[in-house]
Image (tube, rainbow, N blue to C red):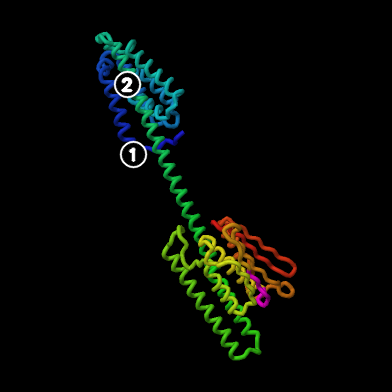
Amino acid sequence: MTPTPPISALGHTWRIALVVTISILAWTPVVEYQAEQALWWLWLDVGLGVVSFVLMFWRRRFPVSVALVTNLVASFSMTSGGPATLTLFSLSTRRRWREILPVSIVSILAASSYLLFWDPIADTRELVFVDLALVVTIVAITVGWGMYVGSRRELLATLHDRAETAESEQAARVAQARIAERARIAREMHDVLAHRISMVTMHAGALSFRDDLSPHEIKRTAAIIEESSRLALVELREVLGVLREGAGDAEPEPPQPTAAAIPGLLEHFRGSGMNLAVDLALDTSTIPAAIGRTAYRVVQEGLTNAAKHAPRTRVEVTIAGGPADGLLLEVTNRLPAGNRPTESLPASGLGLVGLTERAELAGGRLTRTLTADRHLLRVWLPWGS
C-alpha cells in the first residue's frame, strides 16, 4: 500500500471549503421546512453535521469506519452530505474494492431512503427515479475520482522511489568507480615506480656498506642512482598527468609500455648490475599490444622482486610462444643464502596480486613456485587477447 502523502495547509483549506459548500447545497432545499415545521430536525441536522465534520478529520486513520458512519448519518442529516462525500472520496483513494463497495452501497441506500421517506418536498417531485439515478451517478463519480487520485498518487510514489533508487545506484556506481580508479592508480604507481626505487635503494645500500669501491665505481653507482631517481620522477609526473586529464579506459593511457619495450627493460636491469640471463625465443614487437602491456609488467615485476629479495643471485628470463601456443613468460632466480630477503626493502606481495589480476583479465594465468633454493614466476597469456 502506497503511503498517503501529507496534506498541506492549502489542501486542508480547499477541502474544508468544498465540504461546507456541498453541505450548504444539500441543506438549502430543506432548511426552511425544518425551521417552520420540524425545529427538532433542524437542530438534530446541525448537530449531526458538526459531528460528521469532526469525524472527517479522522478519515485517514479510520477510513472505513468514518466513511460508513458519515454516509449513514447523511440519510437524515443534510449538513453531513459534505463530510460523507469527502470520506467516501478519501476511502476510494485506497483502491480497495472490498472497502469501497460496501460503503458505496450504504451511501446509495442512505440517499435513496432520504428521497423516498424523509424528503419533505418529495410530493412535489414527479421524477424521483431521476433523482435516484443522479445519486448513483454522484457516488460513482466520487468513487471514480478517488480511485484516479489514488492511482496517480501511487504512480508518483513509484516514480519517486525509482528516482531515489536510480540516484542511489548512481552514487554506488560512482563510489565503485572511485574505488576501482584508486586501485588502478595504486597498481600503476607500483608498476612504474617500484623497480626504479628498488634500483636506487640497492645501489645506495652498496655505497653505504662498501668501503673498497674505486672512484670510478662510486661515480658509476651514483650515476645509476641519479638516472633511476630522475626516471622515477618523470614516470610519476606522467602518471599524475594522465590522472589529471581523466582519460578513459577505452584505450590504454601512457605511460603504459608494450612488449616492444621489454629488451630495453632487460638492458636497464643488466646495466644496473643484475646478473641476468635472457632466453628470448621471439621478437617482442610481434606480441599483440593487448597482452604486450601485461607481459611488460610481468617482466618488470619479476625482475624488481629479484632485485629486492635476491640482489646478488643469477636471474633467468624466458620469453617464448606464438599465436598457436600463447605467450609464456618465466622469471627464475636463486634464493639468497639463508633464504632471507633484503631486510632494508619492504616485503613483496602487492605487486604479484596486481599481476595475478592483470593476467586473469587478459584470459591468462599466473603461477608462483617457491622451492628450497629457487623462486619461479610463470605467466601464460593467450595470444589472441
Tag 1's secondary structure?
helix
Tag 2's secondary structure?
helix
Marking on residue 138: 2
Front-most of residues 116 and 147? 147
Name the residue type under label 2. Answer: Ile
Q: To which quarter of the image does residue 373 belong?
A: bottom right
Name the residue type under label 1. Answer: Ala
Q: If the image is split into quadrants, where does the C terminus sit?
A: bottom right
**Residue drawn at point x = 71 percent, y = 74 percent:** 336
**Residue drawn at point x = 60 percent, y = 62 percent:** 321
Q: Is residue 385 left or right of residue 131?
A: right
Q: To which quarter of the image does residue 247 belong?
A: bottom left
Asked if residue 97 is among those painted magenta in the image, a careful observer would answer no
Q: Position of residue 294 (x, y in %)?
A: 55, 63
**In the rendered structure, which segment of residues is drawn in magenta?**
310-317
Marking on residue 9: 1
Asked if residue 313 is among those painted magenta in the image, a careful observer would answer yes
Q: To which quarter of the image does residue 207 belong?
A: bottom right
Q: Position of residue 112 (x, y in %)?
A: 35, 14
Q: Position of residue 192 (x, y in %)?
A: 53, 70
Q: Is residue 216 left or right of residue 108?
A: right
Work out whether mark 1 precedes mark 2 in sequence or the reverse, and give the earlier one: 1
